[in-house]
Amino acid sequence: MAPILTTHDLAQAYPTKHGLVEAVRGIDMTVENGEILGFLGPNGAGKTTTLRMLTTLLAPTRGSATVAGHDLATEPRAVRQKIGYVAQSSGLDPQERVRSELVLQGRLYRLSRTEAEARAEELAADLDLTDLLDRKCSELSGGQRRRLDIAMALTHRPALLFLDEPTTGLDPGSRADLWELVRRIRQQEGTTIFLTTHYLDEADALADRLVIIDHGEIVAEGTPTALKEQYGGSPDASLQDTFIAITGHGPRREENAPIAV
Amino acid sequence: MPTVLADSRLIFARYARQTLRSRISLIFGLMQPMLFLGLFGPLLEDVPLGREGDSWQILVPGLLIQLGLFSAAFAGIGILIEKQLGIVERMRVTPVSRTALLLGRVLRDVAMLLVQSLVLVLAGVAFGLRAPVLGVLIGFVFVAVLALSLASLSYAFAMRVRTAQEFAPVINSINLPAMLLSGILLPMALAPTWLDVVSHFVPFRYLVEGVRAAFVGDYGDSSLALGALASVLLAAFSLTLGTRLFRTAGA
Ligand SMILES: Nc1ncnc2c1ncn2[C@@H]1O[C@H](COP(=O)(O)OP(=O)(O)OP(=O)(O)O)[C@@H](O)[C@H]1O
Ligand SMILES: [Mg+2]
């Protein structure tokens, strides 16, 4: 089966007052159908920028990509129909109710009103949001909000789901729940998952393969075990040490908070 | 094309519901024109204003255009907040028509403005305005087209800036001179020649004059035709530019 995502020399340079910021400097990568890919890199490495390009939100300044069988530049609508995206900052309207956000999302994915209402119930049941359907989004906890973000991105059963730091700010219990959810989505729907994270334990536990980006360039890729072997010295090395060996620093620059491994 | 309309309806419904929930915004926008009506209007009652019609038939059309000018030009503020919350990106990543994301919002603004216009005219009647119903309806059409145009530009501009601090000063520095130069409070017939000449370059002037002609029932007047022409040109220009900028803006 052809890979679900390939990029060729994909690049982004933001024009700013102080000149061009080369956020992504020409990356070539492949994501296989059905895998969970962990996309790691320190703050400012270019992860979100890459995701925004791959989700049609930002036109690349150079290069090309095929996403879910469609060319990113020429068939953005077809790409949007097949992907789901949970952004780093959630996109919920605080004044709207959970149900109305889910129903609108269904309608934007071209479901009829009845279909969208049924899908909202179904997703809520699946993601443990049923009791919250009539709450305002401003009244949700961080973990609940994240589950709603994911529910919205699953509305149309996308073949490829992008998650940008889905567990940042969650307590350990909610994080573990979210890992379970991600595994379940892949298992039940065969969804390919492209996720970024700063938690190396998360990458280790969840990802089949890792791609590590730093300063806008891919600096390493492989299975967690292969990377540990190659850069950490042994397959039992910690991913933390491996990451530092690759990027020269921890997953967050100037970070001294402990990172569980 | 039908998907643009269907999508616009969805977006319109969402934002119309939000507006109905926060009725304050409806009332707030009316504050300024109502104050002009109540505290400035009576001053004009016996002043010769240099054109056909009594003072209310001259002032109320001006206030209608002023209301449209200000509320539509600031419409973009709403999307700035949504952009910061990530709501805009979340919608743009779905297959929804991007033009509809603009149009649905703009139509909500137009609807809101028409309700406000109706309230303003009724208040005017209470103060002594007498105008033919057809003329008033024509006035509403002008106001609607004005709002459609300016709100489109406002949203498109808001997509290109980051903060309200960047947004508001630009809008203010365009709106205030535009308002003064279009003879909104007093007709430009009273102006010295240089001011009158300058004001001919401001499209809103033609709209104000057109609505004034409609309010006195002078449907054959050339200023009504000119106003209609100015409206059409303004709308064509603004919608073309607005939708293009809005569609291509990185959220
Ligand atoms: N809109 C923008 N305009 C200018 N520069 C930007 C913009 N967005 C991001 N950048 C810059 O591009 C680089 C990459 O940013 P990006 O958000 O992609 O990093 P990231 O890997 O997602 O980081 P984090 O882990 O902190 O989320 C950074 O140097 C950032 O400052
Ligand atoms: Mg990021």
Image (cartoon, rainbow, N blue to C red):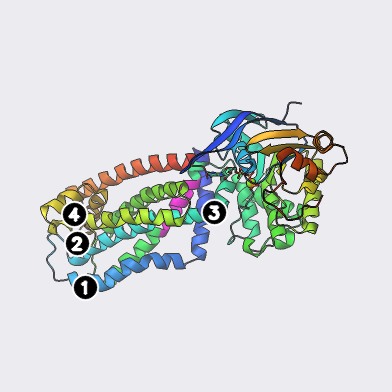
Q: How far apart are marks 2 and 1 (CA)?
A: 13 Å
* Residue B202 visible in this rendered orientation of the protein: yes
Q: How far apart are marks 4 and 3 (CA)?
A: 48 Å
Q: Name the residue under label 4.
A: B218
Which label is found at residue B186? 2
Nearer the observer, B37 or A252:
A252
B221 versus A13 height, above or below: below
Type of amino acid at the residue the image marks with label 1:
Pro
Q: What is the total number of numbered labels drawn onto the structure image?
A: 4
To which chain does the residue with label 3 belong?
Answer: B
To which chain does the residue with label 2 belong?
Answer: B
Stretch in magenta: B101-112
Q: How crowded is mark 2: few (under 14 residues within 10 Å), some or many (20 or more)?
A: some
Which label is found at residue B84? 3
Q: Distance between the residues labelled 3 and 1?
A: 44 Å
**Of circles 3 and 1, which is in front?**
3
SS of the residue under disc 2: loop
Tag 4–tag 3 contact (CB < 8 Å): no
SS of the residue under disc 4: loop
Type of amino acid at the residue the image marks with label 2:
Leu
**Of circles 4 and 3, which is in front?**
3
Q: Mark 1 points at which residue?
A: B42
To which chain does the residue with label 4 belong?
Answer: B
